[in-house]
Amino acid sequence: MKVTLVSRSGREFIKGGLELHDSATVADLQEAIYKRTKKFYPSRQRLTLPVPSGSKERPVVLSYNKSLKDYCDGNQNNITVVFKDLGPQVSYRTLFFFEYLGPLVLYPIFYYFPVYKFFGYEGKRVIHPVQTYALYYWCFHYFKRIMETFFVHHFSHATSPLSNVFRNCAYYWTFGSYIAYYVNHPLYTPVSDLQMKIGFGFGLVCQLANFYCHIILKNLRSPDGSGGYQIPRGFVFNIVTCANYTTEIYQWLGFNIATQTVAGYVFLVVATSIMTNWALAKHRRLKKLFDGKEGRPKYPRRWVILPPFL
């Protein structure tokens, strides 16, 4: 089988194309490209079928575990494939580890070390109980997220663009420092003892619920990450499409009830906006896939992310 590789502009990517055996898979093609180029390793490649000129349809992305013949139209001995360089890639575990490591390390610095001297505060600092509990809550959350990254999550894609490491780290590390600065500030005024207990108690329940939601999502996938989309069921998923995002939002609401800072609520609003966009997209996708037609199950009526608001 001859494979002609072209760029999105139509230029030939590898002169003369590639010759592969008739039973070759997309993964075999990716390895052949890597051997010829020595730069574009498989996770950096995006291979699609050509789209007719003027067509508004999205290109068909080639799945690595399928045979190339599955994508041939008519002539089984020739196929044209469009190559796109996705740029340098990192594994999702690497991405998540570094974005969560920052807040986990930076927050205790504001609690344990005299950093406020650099901001002009020379007086003696009194540490309130709520600040200590906030430290434990914060560190538990991000330690949990790192452990989930390595031992719970199964990722739909093996890698992410390297640029996302810098973007995500900027987001998490900046907000982590922003919140830590104000919660541990020498002039911080604590809330009442009752409000602190309600906030941390509610938040801790949501953290545990969030962990259980991730276990449910993990069990929807096969160990190799294949299997496609399924309807999540059980626990909060019987009410909300994206229960993992719901419990994530409410656990930060609990933290903010207990600590009561503008920085914390700014983070909550920004994070809620981001997760709501993700949830709306996933909700639409699941409703489209499970439309009740041609033997497919119909997606049940559910809230998207924030009952009773959305």
Image (cartoon, helix red, strand yellow):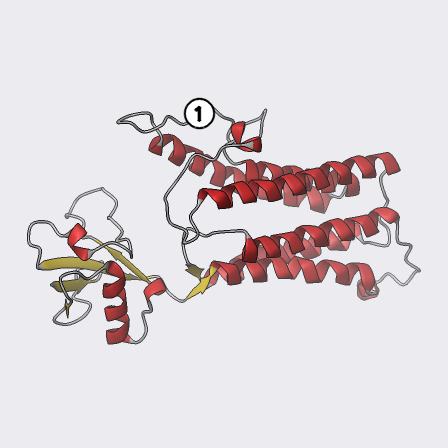
Q: Residue 134 at what x, y percent from top left? A: 78, 49
Looking at the picture, which amino acid does disc 1 mark? Pro
Q: Which residue is rendered at x = 81% and y = 54% of the image?
A: 184
Lateral position of residue 170 relative to residue 177, left or right: left
- Measured as percent of width and height from the top left, residue 79 is found at 13, 58
User: Is residue 186 or residue 75 the one in the foreground?
Assistant: 75
Query: Position of 238 compared to 181: left or right?
Result: left
Q: Which residue is mark 1?
A: 300
Residue at the (18%, 70%) spot, across then down: 14
- Provide residue 264's location: percent of width, then percent of height: 70, 45
Tell which of 71 and 261 is nearer to you.
71
Q: Secondary structure at mark 1?
A: loop
Residue 192 shows in this picture? no
Q: Residues within 10 Å of mark 1 (few under 14, many from 20)?
A: some
Q: Is residue 246 left or right of residue 58?
A: right
Q: x and y percent of residue 209 in the render? A: 63, 39
Q: Residue furthest right?
A: 124
Considering only vertical position in the picture, is 177 above or below 215? below
Residue 128 visible in image: yes
256 in relation to 87, above or below: above
The residue sitting at 20% across, 67% down in the picture is 13
Query: Dividing the image into 4 quarters, which one contains the C terminus?
Result: top right
